[in-house]
Image: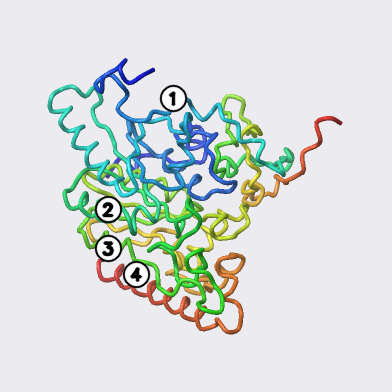
Amino acid sequence: MSSKDKGWKEIAPAGVSPKSSIGFMTGDWKTYMPVRDLEKCTTCLMCVLYCPEGAVRWRPEMGKIEFDYSFCKGCGICANECPTKAITMKLPEKEDE
Amino acid sequence: MATTQEWKITAKDIAEKPDILMPGHRACAGCGPAHALRLVMKAIRGPTIVTEATGCMEVVTSIYPYTSWAVPWLHTAFETSAANASGIEAALKVLKRKGKLKQEHVDVIAIAGDGGTFDIGFQALSGAVERGHDFLFVLYDNEAYMNTGIQRSGGTPMGAATTTTPAGSVMPGKLQHKKPIADIMVAHGMEYVASASPYYWKDLLQKVRRGLEVEGPAFLHLFAPCPRGWRTDPAKTINYSKLAVESCVFPVYEVVNGKYTLSTPSKLIALAPQKKKPVADYLKGQGRYRHLFAPQNKHMLDEIQRWTDERWAKLQQKVEQTA
């Protein structure tokens, strides 16, 4: 589009980011992934509250905590802050096995 | 401020709220500011407009063509987050007067890092507060210009090594103390000034909500550890925000109309001084303070402890004086 097509009144007033970052998967950044021991987990939700990404989600309809590995950057905060030490950081198994 | 008391905050309520700062932002693993702002945005009470100064959180959440914000969001220049907020608030007032605003009330939140508050954005913030615009200013303090490569700012504490104050034979990290920004904001005669640490999430969320409920400017100083700039383990981010409060390096308190009150985590330490941890507990493990533990830099360590104790004693005095 050349500048002749639109005047200053028609063009967007500033740079606009049109896409939601929900489409940008940051999960491939991680080396270690958090794995939860369901027997130790008391569903205290501290991992949900302390995750900087929002990659640990609480699903009230299922009463479950869900780890979204497509966004998890593997920082290990959830494993460090878990009061019952139910989360451990593990190397992911290779896909070709 | 009655609604804050009625607002129940349980882990479940907060976990159920949708993320306004959505996943997919490109902050480093274990980012303190990203976590702090995610919590801040969980405490909003209705339609909200966010404006940000240049800084880590502006850059990582708005890399073209993606945005991580689920609310209207504006960024112009480094120094302008408070000026933007003034403009937005004034425009909302005019729209409301003309009857063009559908919403009953729209909250305005200005977010800036320590560079955009202590140094570059200070005159805009001071002016906006003086004019009395109704907005909440959130300062996420990661104690240096992390986005451009860890340069010192007015918020960098004494002894910290940054790329512009490198620790070595010439100097032992930054030589000056941190600017007491919360005290400066209190001196403006603001209705609400508070400091919060993300480890105490409930306290943080309550303070955000109180700040929004104030009719006029409110200021919130958030502690936000930065694993890259502080040379710490990403997994320990939350741990350091706890240690900073426990060692009184960053006490959490509220100032409502000039009346100081310690928040629960700091109050517990004031009531039981034996629980106060030495500053060294907080400093060790952080790469930026590594040189302080060498024998020739012991005077720096002692000075940091002395200054921290002095500021803590002064804060307790203010609490007593204004009670």
In front: A65, or B149? B149
Q: Is residue B208 above or below residue B103?
A: below
Question: Residue B236, position in %: x, y?
Answer: 60, 56
Label count reads 4
Residue contact between numbered discs 2 and 1, judged by CB atoms under 8 Å = no
Q: CA distance from mark 2 to mark 3?
A: 13 Å
Chain for numbered disc 2:
B
Give the foreground label among 4 and 3.
3
Task: Identify which amino acid the numbered label 2 is placed on.
Answer: Tyr
For the point 37% across and 62% down, which residue is it? B262
Q: Given the image, on which type of amino acid does mark 3 rest?
A: Ile
For label 4, count other residues whose C-alpha is less than 10 Å away and answer few (under 14), some (14-19) or many (20+). some
**SS label for mark 3:** helix
Nearer-the-camera pick, A35 or B67: B67
Report, in whole angstroms, how far the alpha carbon at label 4 lies from the one at label 2. Answer: 16 Å
Amino acid bearing label 1: Pro
Give me the chain letter of mark 3. B
Q: Amino acid at mark 4?
A: Leu
Q: Which numbered tag is attached to residue A18?
A: 1
Marked residue nearer the N-terminal end (4 or 2): 2
**Distance of mark 4 from mark 3, alpha carbons?**
14 Å
Q: Earlier in the sequence, mark 4 or mark 3?
A: 3
Mark-to-mark CA distance, 2 and 1:
36 Å
B274 lies left or right of B317: right
Residue holding disc 2: B192
Give the Cα separation between the discs numbered 1 and 3: 39 Å
Q: Tag 4, which chain?
A: B
User: Disc 4 designates what residue?
Assistant: B315
